[in-house]
Image: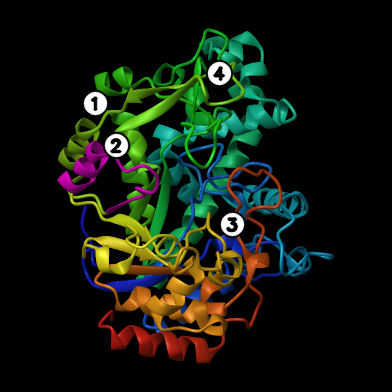
Amino acid sequence: MSGRFHLDQRNSGVLLHPTSLPGPHGCGDLGDQAYRFADFLAQAGQGWWQMLPIGPADQHGCPYSAFSAFAGNPDLISLSHLHKDGLLTRADVAPLKGANSRKVNFTQTRRFRLTRLRKAYETFKAKPARSRGALARFTEKQSDWLDDDSLFFALRQAHGGEHWWKWSPGLRKRNKRDLNRARTELADDIDFYRFMQWQFDKQWSALKRYCADQGVGLIGDIPIFVAHDSSDVWAQPELFELKANGMPAYVSGAAPDAFSKTGQVWNHPLYNWARHKATGYDWWVRRFRHCLTQFDAARIDHFLGFCRYWQIPAAHKTARRGRWRKGPGADLFTTLKRKLGSVPIIAEDLGLLTPEAQALRDRFAFPGMRVLQEAFGREDSYHAPHNFPSRCVVYTGTHDNNTARGWFAKAKAASRNGKLSERQRALVYTDGRPGTIHWDLIRLALSSVADLAIFPVQDLLGLDAKARMNLPGTLKGNWRWRLESGQLKPTIAKRLAAETKLFGRN
């Protein structure tokens, strides 16, 4: 696949998930504020807008635990744009009362948004049949995933949100007669979910075109694993290591290491890689093709897992008794290249980068990641800019890190045995000051040899730890941070544009 945006060109961009945008309805969406952010990026001389996964997130708002690898998140559908399209009234899109402009309350905003989306659907149904042709065409074009997804979500609603493996055996095991009966009984709910996906696609495509016109490419995110409670696992259980009752035999996680003596249990079902290979990796080809129609490039989360992954027996509460298993490696990416052409991928290679994983990344010329918050803890860090190759993406921090200011406040300050502390090394290396450390790191990223430099919008604003997006290993309180209207002032765009131009990135 090819286009006008290329990862191997010297450029820079900003990381901001759309739910973090300002807006009147409880969380950011694909409405006017998304377009204003694209304007800001263009004014600031930035060529990329990076996001987190855009699938339908779980109850905590976690985009890495989505109910579908293909569907768009209804949280992101702009109600204001539905009003412009004549599907909602002005009263319908009045601001959500009691909404927090700084934090998303996913339960509150979803309840509010869903009632309006349903009303928009009812208005749409009342339109003449000829005006409904666009939905029919979308449904047909996306049928390879939309048919199963819309049925899954309708069934999930009919079961009060119950996990699919707790449904009746006929529905859990996808008995043809039971599924046909459900399609008849839930026909209206199925059409409603198709309608939402159509609206998401319309709004997404319009925003993507606008960004491209501003010279801004979009970087998406493909999590290596999918949630157990997802349409993907329900629709094609043979692609996963599941028992007869639908429960996973083994789950994903991280091996014990210096950071965690018991490791981490992520609880995703593991892939039946032999089955994927037998199908010519059809599901993966479709997944990448779908993502790369929505984005100009994509980051693969936990790229290392394609080389090897930690298999944990599902009954175990810790990762101690897991074992390493071999992933599909080059076979998968060779197939992707043969069927899709050159795929613009950023390999999230953070963690224990084995020689095999490094060779896999380099064989396909995927840029890896370097994170400046990891650059100063020891004298010759892998993440220090003097160790960068040009083919990499440097971040001041990722969505899993603290903000730059928050990190610096907690960094070790006292030197030991005559060696610089992490904080001291950061200041010496950047020739910076504590009060401007966020801009010092941005400048360091921009000046580096890395082809691409990315910084979270929180670092542009110099925000402290309260603006952190995610704290790994915790469930609640994450993904909620929001940008406030007017925070990204023209002076920030002007300064970033000047720094970007100085270091040849636009």
Residue in view at x 55 percent, y 68 percent = 414
If you read the primary sequence from the N terminus, does the residue marked by circle 1 or circle 4 appear first? 1
Q: Secondary structure at mark 2?
A: helix
State the image coordinates of residue 257 (x, y, percent, origin top left): 47, 36
Mark 1 Cα-neighbour bin, 10 Å: few <14, some 14–19, many ≥20: some
Residue 138 located left or right of residue 480: left
Q: Amino acid at mark 2?
A: Val
Q: Which residues are magenta?
A: 345-364
Q: Are marks 1 and 4 in contact (CB under 8 Å)?
A: no
Q: Is residue 131 visible?
A: no
Q: Which residue is mark 1?
A: 280
State the image coordinates of residue 353 (x, y, percent, origin top left): 31, 43
Q: Which residue is mark 2?
A: 285
Q: Secondary structure at mark 1?
A: loop
Q: Amino acid at mark 1?
A: Gly
If you read the primary sequence from the N terminus, does the residue marked by circle 3 or circle 1 appear first? 3
Up-down relation of residue 252 to residue 169 (above or below): below
- Front-most of 390 and 318? 318
Q: Amino acid at mark 4?
A: Ala
Q: Which residue is mark 4?
A: 314
Residue in view at x 55 percent, y 40 percent = 66
Q: Are marks 4 and 3 in contact (CB under 8 Å)?
A: no
Alpha carbon separation for disc pair 4 and 2: 28 Å
If you read the primary sequence from the N terminus, does the residue marked by circle 4 or circle 3 appear first? 3
- Front-most of 473 and 62? 473
